[in-house]
Image (tube, rainbow, N blue to C red):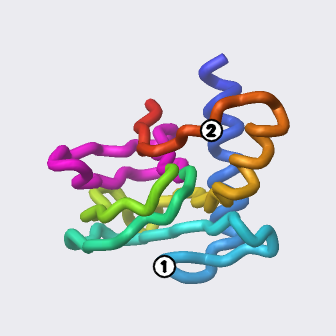
Amino acid sequence: MVDELNQVRQSIVDTLIRHTTVNGVNSTKIHPLHLFKATELTRCDANVYKPSLILTVQGAKSLFLYCENQSFNQGECLISSIDIPITSNITSASEHTPYFSLVFELDLATISSLMVEMGFKVNVSMSIFLR
């Protein structure tokens, strides 16, 4: 099972290598999906993350969120349902082994509408870390 997961991850990395032409955010033809690439370590940078699911595919990133430092390594992700101020830096990346992440922006109006149609109560108000 672990070998199969590593093969899938390597296949995703190979695809990201082909589709990321610059360091930073790379747009795709799928509007809410962005690809992020970094080939070197970065200094802490302040940002506001929009509602999104961010999956670290390769490398590592450190986030300072809610007075807590969180490290995101390959296979780990952040899901945010609100705009969140964050300070972050890339902690594992090189030209040979870039940091890659998939960023899928969430359309909360669409998600809320689907949840109501499915009979769920809508009360989304925080971000969570998934490991």
At horizontal 43% and vertical 62% (from top left) the residue drawn is: 83
Residue 123 lies within the magenta run: no
At horizontal 63% and vertical 68% (from top left) the residue drawn is: 34
CB contact under 8 Å: marks 2 and 1:
no
Q: Which residue does the numbered mark 1 point to in the structure image?
A: 23
Query: Marks 2 and 1, Cα distance to the nearest angstrom?
Result: 37 Å
> How far across and how far down the image is residue 1, in percent?
67, 17
Q: Secondary structure at mark 2?
A: loop
**98 lies left or right of 11:** left
> How far across and how far down the image is residue 23, in percent?
48, 79
**Amino acid type at image mark 1:** Asn
**Amino acid type at image mark 2:** Val
> How far across and how far down the image is residue 16, in percent?
65, 62
Q: Is residue 4 visible?
A: yes
Q: Which residues are magenta?
A: 54-80
Where residue 22 sits, quadrant-wise, is bottom right
Q: Main secondary structure of the magenta part?
A: strand
Q: Which residue does the numbered mark 2 point to in the structure image?
A: 122
